[in-house]
Amino acid sequence: MKILVIPSWYPPKSGFFFQELNEAILHEKNTVDVLVNTVTSIKQLKISDFFHKNIYYNEAGLNVFRSNFYNIPKLNFISNRLWIKNTVKRYIEYSEKNGHPDIIHAHSSIWAGVAAYRIYKKFSIPYVITEHRSRFIFNTPEAEKMLPEKYFPLLQSALKNASHITCVSPALCPKLTDIEKSVETKTVVIPNTVDSDKFKPGKTKNSENEFKWFSLGKLNPVKGFDILLKAMSILINNTDKTVTLRIGGDGREYKNLRKLSENLNLTKNVVFLGNLDKNIVVKEMQKAHAFVLPSRFEAFGVVYIEAAACGLPLVGTDAGGQSSIINEKNGYLAKPENPEILAETMLKMMRNYQSFDKKEIRNETIKKYDKQTIAKKYCNLFSKIINEQH
């Protein structure tokens, strides 16, 4: 099969799980091309960029065609429409040189899925949309603001005409069905993947007199680090153990969270590590007793399965995709937005830590989320769609 992937975002900025999946699908003896139209600040615009088209790169065997789209500040909805139009233009340029693919795989309906629909209208290329965006959880006012109704007409056409919709967790399906009823009969859940060769248990033996928590994510309100710090303040006053929390990641809430940590007298217990590359993330996970992330809403939560692949038991919130990952064998779920309940849940983990089997946690994670297992599911779906077209 010749598969063209159109991602709404892509490395090196973000979307590394798209890249990992593309590489896994490539290993199933397919041709995989990737059309990347990176949203870039207009401040970085150069005169020479007006003459640039798709620039080709070979990235780990993937044929990646890269271009930049310059965002108009404070005019997001107009910029989104222009990005869609520009992506279709980049596709035409790509297809003139490389021919049409058998199928298009669009990562997120906002806005790669809409671009794929526009290409389908012109050239009848079937497409599959994989939805990743946590705003479709639609469980908080913040999530609702991120998905205004003015988006719906664009999304309806894209969803209605897609051959299939895949969601990375069941939590995303209801809102998609609410936007476009026909989605209900053609939606399947295919989760994200984990690189189990990279994320694996370490050999560190932790002291019984201390408990080391690790957390990782963008330091923004969605991830709930403010709730986590408040829970830590409660937790350390209810245990005789030395409790530490190491937080990886950076973001707009960094200064506020540091200040909150100081106000709660947590500077000896909480360490902010900043941005971490994957090798350092693995080492941090291997040194920890358990992983915690109390997101307010989450489409899936790749970081949970990365921690589980390292054998760590998990504490998360019942607020989206993590609810499909965390179960009685690998951790506990707490109610979101509640530091007291989160502290109780973390204390429960500390008391019952020895009852969790690290090998079983890892083995079950690999069984469900291994790259090649997930790649085969996509390849089978793509083959079925292509065969039905003929």
Image: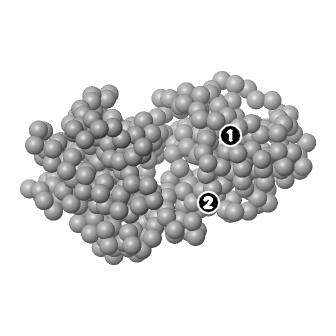
Location of the C terminus (image quadrant): bottom left
Mark 1: amino acid:
Ile
Q: Viewed as shown, does residue 116 lie left or right of 147?
A: left
Q: Residue 247, labelled with which disc?
A: 1
Quadrant of the image occupied by residue 124:
bottom left
Of the pair 55 and 293, the residue shown nearer to us: 55
Rendered residue at 31%/54% (across/down)? 83
Give percent across and percent down for residue 242. 85, 37
Q: Secondary structure at mark 1?
A: strand
Say if 77 sits above or below 280 in the image.
below
Of the pair 110 and 129, the residue shown nearer to us: 110
Say if 176 sits above or below 8 in the image.
below
Give percent across and percent down for residue 280. 59, 28
Q: Viewed as shown, does residue 249 lie left or right of 386?
A: right
Rendered residue at 23%/66% (across/down)? 161
- The local crowd at label 2, few if under 14, some if 14 to 19, many if 20 or more residues have their Cα within 10 Å, is many
**Residue 383 seen in render:** no
